[in-house]
Image (cartoon, rainbow, N blue to C red):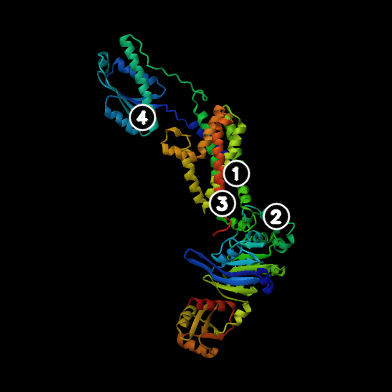
């Protein structure tokens, strides 16, 4: 049955009514979605949204309280033994042996999967080459970005069909973050299905599709482009000298829906559409300070911010 | 470090752990100052067990000495001691013993009773001219440990402790350590089998423990000059079975603990009970019945019994088969529990 389903919608990962509770706490509530083959799929959401729990269920490390999930037609509970051969997993915290060298770690994980580094070198070549000069260094002495590359190499060494990354960019510098996403894009070209979780909303733009999660539920699944296009609330960027007072005052105004600091300006959404100049006058009158207001297009963060608040209300 | 420390422990404890009580400090209050009383005192001073540290004429002085810890016991001889004895009257001697250390007090009591009784017979012989013999004479012959050498008795036991320590503590740390640094997270997703993981983890410690046993046996032979009576091969065979059980205990502890502190704490809890109820320091036979039943679950007890029997007495396999089978079953049960308790998937 599942195989027929797969042929119909080409879904590689199927998540069907998955719930998970720890005692009283509902970590996941009725999750349903599917991920296509060689898709770069993002799980976006704040801390505690249930991203890690969902990933742990998919990598067969955690049993769901109810519902079922399958990867390539194999059930994550019943067929876990088979699945472990085709899953690559990179946990949120560095989980390799710090007292082994780079090369030893790689060899170790290759051996566990009954393969050799030589056999699958082509898979990790691009990534591993960058840390190969340090292959005799202990993993514990690597920098954060290099650890990341090693962890990714180890997760790929057995030629997985699907790769899970749990918050790979948390605590990593900006350059390494960009590098990581570039690597993921390259891997996607090799027909690898990738599911990545992140609390950084700007990273959603780099995914093919994203599931926005909050409080154990999936609020929306869509392409980043579509999410931005669907944003229909009027949005303005307001700048002023006294930033903090401006923010407080804006929040007091009756026309304001939301006001959030965003870089050097405040992103303001309103209940009704205004001309920028007219809105600016209204703001100057109310706050008593010189401001500059212009209408802007929403970016993905504005969209998530709005969805989050709508959900909380 | 792993090898130097046990070596030092074995040498240190082998020489220091000695239950024979010598050098008991005696305070003498001689209120009689007679020939008889001096005779009794000289008996005490001639004994290797007593040191006379002080003489006085008042109870208070004696008590002061004991309170300060200078005297372990006070011998008080009443006035008219000689006179009463010559007149065939009873003249009790007063003996006060510091009983803070029960073992020491018991021995002090026994030694001094022996000396006083002997002296009593001596005086009777002198005054009556007849020879009095104690009703039954006891002659003891110390088998298997001629000369009652304490290190001969202790060293095999201490050896057991060292091997156990490596087995139990190090193995208790291993799985917990993987949990703490998170590597277990990465390993669990791999197709590695539970038993592969566990055997891979325990094997190095088994080898280290056996190496430690070897070093210990060499030290016992060369430093303590213990003659091994039984088969060394049998010792290794038993050690293998024993270590399987002990490593299993460590593993079980590490599967139920989340942090190394927890694992350490639980290990110590069991280790202390195991040592103190092993028969190494106090004989199991003198424990209350319920406590003796608890020792049935003490692997150290079986290993010490075994080591003493095989190394010192030269017992063949059939005499220690009992210990062998118990340890084998113990190992099987504990390891099954440990493997069963180690879950790759969480609920």
Q: Earlier in the sequence, mark 3 or mark 1?
A: 1
Q: For this view, does B36 lie left or right of residue B206?
A: left
Provide the chain ID for the residue under circle 3.
B
Q: Residues within 10 Å of mark 3 (few under 14, many from 20)?
A: few
Q: Return the mark for residue B340.
A: 3
User: The residue tagged with tag 4: helix, strand or loop?
Assistant: loop
Provide the chain ID for the residue under circle 1.
B
**Residue B151 at what x, y percent from top left?**
51, 29
**Residue B21 at what x, y percent from top left?**
42, 28
Q: Earlier in the sequence, mark 1 or mark 4?
A: 4
Q: Which residue is mark 1?
A: B205
Relative height, residue A243 to residue A148 (above, below): below
- The answer as to whether the residues below labels 1 and 2 share one chain is no
Q: Which residue is mark 4?
A: B72
- The answer as to whether the residues below labels 4 and 3 share one chain is yes
Q: Residues within 10 Å of mark 2 (few under 14, many from 20)?
A: few
Front position among marks 2 and 4: 2
Provide the chain ID for the residue under circle 4.
B
Front position among marks 4 and 3: 3
**Residue B275 at what x, y percent from top left?**
48, 39
**Residue B307 at what x, y percent from top left?**
55, 33
Find out whether the residues at labels 2 and 3 contact each other: C-beta distance under 8 Å. Answer: no
Query: What whole-number distance in Å separates the C-alpha atoms at marks 1 and 2?
Result: 25 Å
Q: Which residue is mark 2?
A: A114
Q: Earlier in the sequence, mark 4 or mark 3?
A: 4
């Amino acid at each position: 049955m599942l195989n027929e389903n797969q042929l119909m919608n080409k879904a590689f990962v199927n998540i069907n009514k998955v719930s998970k509770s720890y005692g009283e706490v509902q970590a996941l509530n009725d999750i349903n979605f599917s991920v296509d083959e060689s898709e770069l799929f993002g799980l976006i959401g704040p801390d505690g949204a249930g991203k890690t729990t969902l990933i742990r269920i998919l990598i067969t490390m955690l049993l769901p309280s109810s519902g079922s999930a399958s990867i390539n037609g194999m059930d994550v509970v019943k067929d876990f033994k088979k699945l472990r051969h085709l899953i690559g997993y990179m946990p949120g915290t560095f989980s390799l042996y710090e007292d082994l060298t780079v090369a030893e770690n790689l060899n170790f994980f290759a051996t566990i999967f009954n393969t050799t580094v030589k056999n699958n070198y082509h898979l990790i070549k691009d990534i591993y080459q960058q840390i190969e000069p340090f292959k005799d260094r202990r993993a514990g002495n690597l920098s954060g970005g290099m650890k990341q590359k090693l962890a990714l190499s180890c997760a790929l060494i057995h030629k997985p069909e699907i790769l899970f990354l749990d918050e790979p960019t948390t605590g990593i510098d900006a350059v390494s973050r960009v590098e990581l996403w570039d690597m993921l894009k390259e891997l996607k070209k090799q027909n690898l299905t990738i599911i990545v979780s992140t609390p950084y909303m700007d990273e959603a733009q780099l995914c093919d599709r994203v599931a926005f999660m909050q409080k154990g539920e999936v609020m929306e699944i869509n392409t980043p482009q579509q999410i931005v296009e669907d944003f229909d609330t009027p949005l303005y960027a307001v700048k002023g000298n006294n930033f903090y007072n401006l923010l407080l005052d804006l929040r007091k105004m009756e026309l304001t829906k939301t006001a959030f600091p965003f870089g050097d300006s405040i992103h303001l959404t309103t209940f009704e559409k205004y001309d920028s100049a007219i809105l600016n006058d209204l703001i100057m009158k109310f706050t008593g300070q010189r401001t500059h207001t212009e209408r802007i297009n929403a970016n993905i963060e504005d969209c998530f911010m709005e969805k989050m608040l709508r959900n909380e209300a | 470090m792993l090898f130097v420390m046990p070596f030092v422990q074995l040498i240190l404890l082998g020489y220091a752990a000695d239950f024979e009580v010598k050098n008991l400090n005696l305070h003498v209050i001689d209120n009689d100052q007679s020939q008889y009383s001096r005779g009794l005192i000289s008996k005490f001073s001639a004994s290797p067990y007593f040191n006379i540290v002080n003489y006085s004429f008042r109870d208070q002085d004696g008590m002061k000495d004991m309170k300060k810890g200078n005297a372990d016991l006070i011998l008080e001889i009443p006035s008219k001691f000689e006179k009463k004895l010559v007149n065939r009257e009873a003249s009790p001697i007063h003996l006060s013993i510091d009983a803070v250390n029960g073992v020491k007090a018991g021995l002090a009591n026994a030694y001094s009773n022996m000396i006083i009784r002997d002296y009593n017979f001596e005086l009777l012989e002198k005054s009556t001219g007849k020879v009095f013999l104690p009703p039954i004479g006891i002659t003891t012959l110390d088998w298997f440990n001629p000369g009652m050498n304490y290190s001969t008795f202790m060293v095999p036991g201490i050896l057991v402790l060292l091997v156990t320590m490596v087995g139990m503590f190090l193995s208790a740390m291993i799985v917990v350590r993987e949990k703490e640094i998170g590597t277990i997270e990465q390993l669990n997703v791999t197709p590695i089998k539970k038993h592969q993981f566990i055997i891979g983890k325990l094997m190095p410690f088994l080898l280290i423990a056996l190496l430690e046993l070897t070093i210990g046996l060499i030290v016992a032979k060369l430093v303590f000059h213990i003659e091994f009576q039984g088969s060394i091969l049998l010792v290794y065979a038993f050690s293998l079975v024993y270590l399987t059980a002990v490593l299993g205990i460590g593993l079980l502890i590490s599967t139920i603990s989340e942090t190394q502190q927890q694992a350490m704490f639980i290990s110590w809890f069991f280790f202390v009970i195991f040592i103190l109820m092993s028969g190494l320091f106090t004989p199991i036979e003198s424990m209350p019945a319920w406590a003796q039943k608890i020792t049935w679950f003490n692997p150290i007890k079986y290993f010490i019994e075994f080591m003493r029997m095989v190394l010192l007495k030269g017992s063949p396999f059939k005499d220690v088969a009992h210990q062998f089978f118990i340890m084998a079953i113990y190992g099987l049960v504990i390891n099954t529990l440990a493997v069963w308790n180690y879950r790759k998937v969480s609920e």
